[in-house]
Amino acid sequence: MPFFKEEDLMSGSVHLSEDGSAVVIVDQTKLPNRTEYLALRTKEDIYDAIKVLAVRGAPAIGICAAYAMYVVSRGKAGMDYEEFAASMQADGEFINSSRPTAVNLSWAIRRQMGVVEAGRGKSTEEIINDLKAGAIAIHREDIEMCGRISEYGLSLVKPGDGILTHCNAGPLATSKYGTAIGPILLGKERGVDFKVFADETRPLLQGARLTSYELEKAGVDVTLICDNMASMVMKNGWVQACFVGCDRIAANGDFANKIGTSGVAILAKHYGIPFYTLGPTSTIDMNCPTGADIRIELREPDEIKTMWYEKPMALPETKCFNPSFDVTDHELLTAIVTDRGIVYPPFDVNLKKLFA
Ligand code: MRU
């Protein structure tokens, strides 16, 4: 079902099908061994795809949810405004309950609900068209934001630098370029080479399966390491900067990202290496005062015990703690790289200025 070609993976993993009846995603759970596409047509399809991480990465989840709001609205064409708005609200809440941490999900659904509210007085068919335009706008804006983040990020490093990254914040998780991987891909386009260390990112291996895949395809020098090797490569002097993504940035600069990110930040501080998070302004949640207010998703023990093994690697009765994200304290952050510029401490003051 090749709705878009493999080379298009470099411009994101989420698209609208030509006839508008489905959100088409690259199934990220199958990479790097198979490139498979899923056509998501119902709110249940969307919920499941987000839940199992077939679509993942904060901006990609937001783009997927925005298109989803359009796709599900098409089945409500015969409704009057009140019924349509109530049904869209219910579908939005259902999709939003699939994962709690990345703010882009609720942000995109709220923005699409704004389109529904602004449509009072219009025909349902007109509002459905507006939802399509709204989703395309969110997708286009993400491409532009990634481009700007990549430019700002590129200004922070020198040719030949070693860059360590955690999880996957490349084109698959966003649109063109990505966020944390954006400066590296933009640099490559301009003939500027870096040496990238990709943490494999236990337990779901986004670094191994997705980041090293994207960078190999782009011809970037990438070395895959287990998460517990980051300290050694830093001590060896091979890392000049850490670039990571983010799922929600609180108003004081604390931020949630893939589990293990805060450990990387602590190591970077120890070795005196600058540590940056890169993300679009849609990932900044000014209604969330600190990292303590971010809800962290807990996932199933099987992801740790059995997922990548032929036989379970622990006894069935062994307890597991499997948080999908952790919060990095803003004091460990050198700067936040956004599409509107690079934000330095004090983050509480300077993030407010960004939105002023
Ligand atoms: O659980 P995941 O794979 O969705 O977690 C993704 C991350 O933590 C990314 O770093 C983050 O969403 C930024 S993607 C540009």
Image: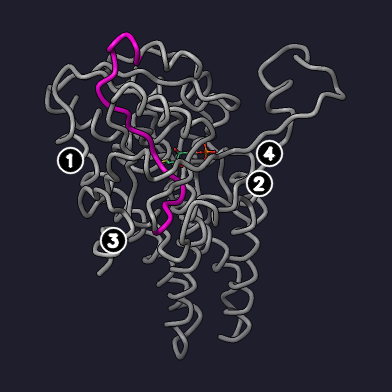
In reply to whether residue 235 is colored magenta, the answer given is: yes
Q: Amino acid at mark 1?
A: Glu
For mark 2, what is the residue? 48
Element class at badge 3: helix
**Is the residue marked by circle 3 packed among few (<14), some (14-19), or many (20+) residues within 10 Å?**
some
Horizontally, is 91 left or right of 243 in the view? right
Residue 151 - label: 1
What residue do we see at 63% from left, 74% from top? 87
Q: Amino acid at mark 2?
A: Asp
Looking at the rendering, the stretch of residues picked out in magenta corresponds to: 234-251
What residue do we see at 51% from left, 25% from top? 201
**Is the residue marked by circle 4 packed among few (<14), some (14-19), or many (20+) residues within 10 Å?**
some
Which numbered disc, 2 or 3, marks the residue closer to the eye? 3
Residue 131 position in % (x across, y down) = 44, 69
Pick whichever of labels 2 and 1 is earlier in the sequence: 2
Query: Under 8 Å from ligand 1: the CB of mark 2?
Result: no
For mark 3, what is the residue? 349
Structural distance between the alpha carbons of marks 1 and 4: 35 Å
For mark 4, what is the residue? 299
